[in-house]
Image (cartoon, rainbow, N blue to C red):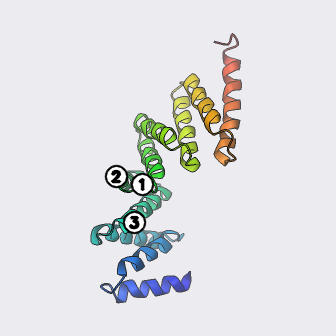
Amino acid sequence: TAKALEVLEFIVKERPHGGHIEMAMSDLAGLLAASEVGADRDRALAYYTEIRERFDMPSLQETATLGGGRLLMRRGKYEEALAWWREYLRREEWVSSRPEANFQFGRCLEEIGKPNEALKLYVSVYANFPGHLDWSTQAYLRTAEILKRDHKDADALLVMVDMLKRLGRFDHPNVAIAREQFAKWKADWVARNPSGS
């Protein structure tokens, strides 16, 4: 990776108008985004932004929008990430990561203090994309957590029941978390409602 980084840096800096510069810039942004160094991630975000603004190539713009959104999420910059995910969702022709974009858009809304708006996104993810387990399972779990936090314990339990009925047969870490959480919440519910109400 170090050699690839060196070559891509050279191409982007020394041949900024050369052939396939957009591909080199996209690859460089991807490598820099994976770095643990803050300055590298800042440069990655700048390259993703430049790709979106400079190159009229939908597939690269999609990749850059995803890359920027993901990078901002990892850095906890939810307000900034919101704009990147909104842009992804605005482009109807971009479908490869629509479940992720919907979930992450909801996550941003939740993090900036709009959990009720986030709920709508989460429900859309698990209702429309149940087979995308990485995102649908997280959407179920976030929905249940928000409801539980709002003291809507019965609704939270119903969401967990729905998740386990629809997705419980799959071997996925979030399904295991849901089983454990459901058992805990159900036991708490039964203890607080001994008459079965």
Q: Position of residue 169 (x, y in %)?
A: 69, 40
Q: Residue at x 28, y 68 (%)?
A: 53
Q: Which residue is mark 1?
A: 95
User: How dense is the environment of label 2, judged by Cα within 10 Å: few (below 14), some, or many (20 and up)?
Assistant: few
Which residue does the image show at 34% across and 88% down from the upper left?
A: 15
Mark before the other along the chain sequence, 3 or 2 = 3
Tag 1: amino acid = Val
Q: Residue 54: give x, y in percent of width and height.
A: 28, 72
Rendered image: mark on residue 187: none
Q: Which residue is mark 3?
A: 64
Query: Considering the image in quadrants, where does the N terminus appear?
Result: bottom right
Task: Determine whether, in the image, residue 11 is placed left or right of residue 150.
Answer: left
Mark nearest the camera among 3 and 2 is 2
Vertically, is 151 above or below 79? Answer: above
Q: Quadrant of residue 118?
A: top left
Q: Amino acid at mark 2?
A: Glu
Task: Decide which of 112, 25 is in the foreground and name it.
Answer: 25
Quarter of the image containing the C terminus? top right
CB-based contact (under 8 Å), mark 1 and mark 2: yes
Q: Nearer the viewer, residue 30 or 125?
A: 125
Residue depicted at 34% across the width and 70% down the height? 51
Q: Amino acid at mark 3?
A: Ala
Classify 19 as above or below 147.
Answer: below
Residue 92, numbered circle: 2
Secondary structure state at the residue bearing disc 1:
loop
- Residue lying furthest top: 195
| Marks 3, 1: nearer the viewer | 1
Disc 1 from disc 2: Cα separation: 7 Å
Point out residue 11 in the picture as x, y percentages from the top left corner. 40, 86
Circle 3 sits in a helix, a strand or a loop, which is it?
helix
